[in-house]
Amino acid sequence: MKEYITLSEEVKQAKEQGKPIVALESTIISHGMPYPQNVQTAREVEQIIRDNGAVPATIAIVDGKIKIGLSDEELEMFGKASDVAKASRRDLGYLLATKKLGATTVAATMICAELADIHIFVTGGIGGVHRGAETTMDISADLEELAQTNVAVICAGAKSILDLGLTMEYLETKGVPVIGYQTDVLPAFYTRSSQFAVNFRADDVETISNTLKAKWDLNLKGGAVIANPIPEEHAMDEKTITNVIETALKEATENHIAGKEVTPFLLAKVKELTGGKSLDSNIALVKNNAVLGAKIAVQLGNLK
């Protein structure tokens, strides 16, 4: 297995020195934001993690290797490349075998992080059960990964383009705890709240870290969702974003857009319809998650 994994110099040193490490995905660079905001955001998020006492490890597939930690040049290359495959669990073997470029989704990042013994992962929002999934069966692989991989995902909830109620039901069935950081309800990515309650509320980092430690000490397999609402000043108006999403979903259906093309299409459409405000919100919430993720990683490291 080691032949497939390469650690960056920074990550290697962190491991040798026993420093806390936070995993970051690479689809946010290749598929989540336009250039140059994608690379700039990636660099800023990495720096936020360093400033809060942990070491960032952006994960991607390059030249037949799972890279745990990217160099500055690699971040730039990912930000500009147009032929990057979106890698989930099913794609990892093929992308490694063919030495194609692969950007890791939430699911693939979790797998790679666990292989590298990293258990805290910061992202924007998790995937979930898509609207209309009762007929399309369109359910993100992220949920299945959360059920079986020991990585906690710090996110601003799930994107409101999804069916949040069914997403919560699915996570409950799989025994994945959804912990709200200083919130009683599931944040909906661009907005701070939804009508769905989280399983547990934690008002401090210690409670989250102790919960994760106890869960994994008991060998209760699977991850956890740490739902961290977007900061108030960057949140979007709930009614506005709902209308925008309804319009975008309608257009996706009319254009027969399906499968893994749906999310990038919807996010691009939402950005267009909000005059770019959604991109600003997206960047703000990822940075906010990076602060919390680093603090949890540091605290978890102290418990070991």
Image: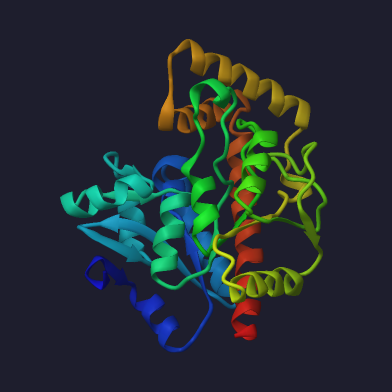
Q: Nearer the viewer, residue 27 or 169?
A: 169
Picture coordinates of residue 112 (x, y %)?
39, 62
Q: Quadrant of residue 154?
A: bottom right
What sort of colour scheme is used for the picture? rainbow
Front residue of 92/160: it is 92
**Is 166 placed left or right of 100 in the picture?**
right
Q: Does any portion of residue 189 appear in the rendered image? A: no
Q: Is residue 251 left or right of residue 85?
A: right
Residue plotted at (42% across, 47% down): 27
Q: Residue furthest left?
A: 98
Query: Is 15 drawn above or below residue 181 in the view shown?
Result: below
Question: Which residue: 39% across, 77% down?
Answer: 10
Q: Which residue corresponds to the image point at 53% horizontal and 78% vertical from the top-left?
A: 20
Locate residue 39 relative to residue 44 in the image: left or right: left
- Residue 176: image quadrant is bottom right
Q: Pinpoint residue 71: horizontal percent, then vertical percent.
A: 34, 66
In the depicted structure, whether residue 64 falls above or below residue 261 = below
Q: Give the position of the C terminus as an image quadrant.
A: bottom right
Numbered circles on residues, count: 0
Quarter of the image with the N terminus is bottom left
Q: Residue 134 in the image: x percent, y percent?
A: 57, 24
Question: Is residue 285 visible to the viewer in this orientation of the structure?
Answer: yes
Q: Position of residue 218 (x, y in %)?
A: 61, 73
Residue placed farthest to the top in the image? 254
At horizontal 57% and vertical 46% (from top left) the residue drawn is: 126
Residue 51 to residue 140: above or below: below
